[in-house]
Image (cartoon, rainbow, N blue to C red):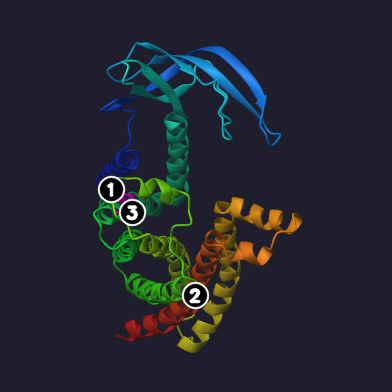
Amino acid sequence: MKKRLYNLFLLLFAFLLFFPFTLQAQQTEGLISFTAKVVEIKDSVSKTSSEGGEFTQQNLYLEAISGPRQGEFFLYEGISEVEVANQKIYQVGDKVFVDVFSTDEGGEIVYVTEYVRSKSLLILAFIFIVIFLLIGKGKGLRALLSLVLTFIIIIKFILPLILAGHNPFLISLAGGLIIMILVIYITEGWKRKSHLAILAVIFSLLVTLILSLIFTNLTRLTGMAQEETVYLLGLGSLVLDFRGLLLAGILIGAIGVLDDIIVSQIEAVERIKEANPSLSPKRVFSLAYKIGNTHLGTMVNTLFLTYAGAALPLLLIFVLSRESGLDLSRAINSELISTEIIRTLVGSIGVMSAMPIATFLGAYGLEKWTKK
């Protein structure tokens, strides 16, 4: 009974921390932000852009459903001569985020900025948690708790320190190690294989760290190729080390995958030794290495597809460069594409090195631990 209550407490704790966001209105000088509901489509016009693409513009009648202007109605005039590539099409009943700017003449300009997607996201997350707990059971609950703690560390520790001006690379390295230690010990418990897994993570992360430093220096990456840097540059007196931010992203991306392959390999070693305790460490290493090869093949492919999916617009540049006769070599050497290439290859090398490191530490480390 106590165990069930404990698990229920952990579940509620994780659920509350996992969804810390609320739909609150915000107000700054000259700007009011709130959520509203589309009550009427006043007008809708389909247009053709100068490139031949079609887009739709709408005038909307909105009712504020939060904030100090709740209950008031606003007219959003979205029909204009400006071409908008990512124009959204709204329907009656849609909930949206609205920004209202005050003009010097005493008037107001209304902008619809985005859909309110929180409800759908909450439903999906709830389905994820239920399925995760049904399949993973007790270990799934611990994994969910570690996921929440990871989120907290990133939001409350890593990001604030980076915004405070500290080196993003060092902060992410320290935060990443803390995350890995917590994740492994929470999900696997205080066991010898957990100690070995953390040791393997440190060695593998060291490989990723060295390669990241070497090749970002050799290719002279600045970390400012992504369009998001434009928004960060415009944040007043905020000074960020964008190159360190790039290295931090590579490390954090690698850490999540390292956890998977390292824990899996040490678990495979332990199961082999359990099935046949008389096997020598060398033989155990050989058998586990074969398992790791299979896992590694799918893991590296998964890692590549993950990066490729995130960088799909960049892959289109490759195709367009070739079809339009542009210099493909020049496209590859652009910082935007070079960054993704280095991110993918360095992360993959880190994962590949983790497999033999974890297998070796498991085969020989568990052997010595058992003899003690």
Residue nearest the viewer, comparing 98 with 198: 98
Which amino acid lies under the numbered mark 2 shown in the image of this protein? Met
Q: Please name the residue shown 69% across and 57% down the image.
A: 321
Q: Which residues are magenta?
A: 149-155
Which amino acid lies under the numbered mark 1 shown in the image of this protein? Lys
Crowd band around label 3 with a 10 angstrom C-alpha radius: few (<14), some (14–19), many (20+): some
Crowd band around label 2 with a 10 angstrom C-alpha radius: few (<14), some (14–19), many (20+): many
**Residue 115 in sight:** no
**Residue 194 in sight:** yes
Q: Secondary structure at mark 3?
A: helix
Is 184 a magenta residue?
no
Q: Position of residue 3 (x, y in %)?
A: 28, 48
Is 152 a magenta residue?
yes
N-term mark: 3 or 2: 3
User: Mark 3 or 1, which is nearer the eye?
Assistant: 3
Query: Would residue 99 appear left or right of 265 to someone viewing this image?
Result: left
Q: Please name the residue shown 55% across and 56% down the image.
A: 306
Dividing the picture into quarters, in which one does residue 28 lie?
Answer: top left
Crowd band around label 1 with a 10 angstrom C-alpha radius: few (<14), some (14–19), many (20+): few
N-term mark: 3 or 1: 1
- What residue does disc 2 label? 355
Q: Quadrant of the N terminus?
A: top left
- What residue does disc 1 label? 3
- What residue does disc 3 label? 150
Q: CA distance from mark 2 to mark 1?
A: 35 Å
Residue nearest the viewer, comparing 36 with 289: 36
